[in-house]
Amino acid sequence: MTMNGSREKCVLIAAGGTGGHVIPGVEVAKELRDRGWECVFIGTSRGFENRLVPQAGFALRHLPAGSLKRVSLRRRLSTLVSAPRAVASALRLIKRRRPAAALSLGGYTAGPLVAACALLDVPLVVLEPNATPGLANRLAAPAARRTLLGHPAAASHFSAATSRVTGMPVRREFFRSPPKRPGSPFSVLILGGSQGAARLNRAALDAVRAWRARGDDVPRLVHQTGRLEYAAVSETYRGLGVEVEAAAFFDDMPRHFARADLVVCRAGASVIAELCAARKPAVLVPFPFAADDHQRANGSVLESAGGAVLVDDAEWTGDRMVREVDGFRQAPDRLAAMAAALAPLATADAVGDAAAAVADAAGRAGGIG
């Protein structure tokens, strides 16, 4: 089945769920917009795209899609039952918008959009951000005109004829981040991802308690808590008598990176790319329930390069945070060496490469290049 008639200069982008999917998609969409393209995002009504996509000035359309991995049997069955309806919704959207191409970054809505693109012969580009590819992109790759890889480690999962390593798209401001001058106060940026991380929140609070009990100086903490625990974490900090810059989510992340000596975070693909671009040493605590354990694979890339310390989730306690942070406070030369190790891993052209691949796929298919 093919879609007849001329295509519009429009790109559909499947990027939903967490900031790790949405933020790279938004950056590519901005580049495409600068090149004269209209971009429409495909997401769900509950994902982080509902905040970030309209904020960036792009249209967002919802599909009734859900997860199949690491969810209950009931949730999995619900996703399978709703799948035909999600594909039908994607088909209707394609027939209405007549896109010249589509871009998939994985996430819940990638499957329905990819299926609809295959049925209506819409050129598809897949962007796989992780060192261990996700299920949605592995299934989508055979139908894609081009697969762009954020990590060389992912190359073995895709056809060499249609895939290439371009790196992960990140905001250009990260590359312009000036190195922080060592000095007082030592600053630690704590990031649990767009949805927060209870383990990182608890460890930070316990670390403050330990520093206070020992009479030590508490480093300057800047803490993204996630929406669910923001009120409780902020109140606990106040009760401990420390001033911490805490927020459920930081919009101006490049500014916070620039002010940090050390970042403590999960190991999603977006934050990994941001650390490399900004050359920020990190302690990485991979989320242990991430699909295919892809966060550990992501973090191992930085650890092997010498730019990060990798710590198991179960081992990240207040005491461990105190030991790690105090060790870095006393070793500025180590921080400088780690920052230098991250620089070669940064890929400044990833946004432009992704936008060019989408335009090229549209042009080769007879769309608007």
Image (cartoon, rainbow, N blue to C red):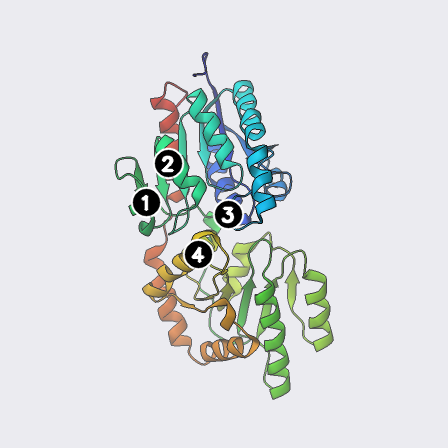
N-terminal of the pair, mark 3 or mark 4, is 3
Marks 1/2 in contact by CB < 8 Å: the verdict is yes
Quadrant where the N terminus sits is top left
x and y, in percent, of residue 228 in the image: 68, 57
Marks 2/3 in contact by CB < 8 Å: the verdict is no
Task: Please state which amino acid type lies under the numbered disc 1.
Answer: His
Q: Secondary structure at mark 4?
A: helix
Q: Residues within 10 Å of mark 1 (few under 14, many from 20)?
A: few
Looking at this view, is 10 or 68 the one in front? 68
Position of 124 with respect to 66 (left or right) is left
Mark 3 vs mark 1, CA separation in Å: 19 Å
Q: Which residue is mark 1?
A: 157
x and y, in percent, of residue 17 in the image: 56, 45
Marks 1/4 in contact by CB < 8 Å: the verdict is no
N-terminal of the pair, mark 2 or mark 3, is 3
Residue drawn where x is 43% and y is 66% of the image: 281
Q: Residues within 10 Å of mark 4 (few under 14, many from 20)?
A: some
Quadrant where the C terminus sits is top left
x and y, in percent, of residue 175 in the image: 43, 53
Q: Which residue is mark 2?
A: 141
* Res 35 seen here: no
- Between label 3 and label 4, give the one nearer the viewer: 3
x and y, in percent, of residue 147 in the image: 35, 38
- Between label 3 and label 1, give the one nearer the viewer: 3
Q: Which residue is mark 3?
A: 69
Q: Residue furthest left?
A: 161
Q: Residues within 10 Å of mark 3 (few under 14, many from 20)?
A: some
Q: Secondary structure at mark 3?
A: loop
Q: Which mark is residue 293?
A: 4
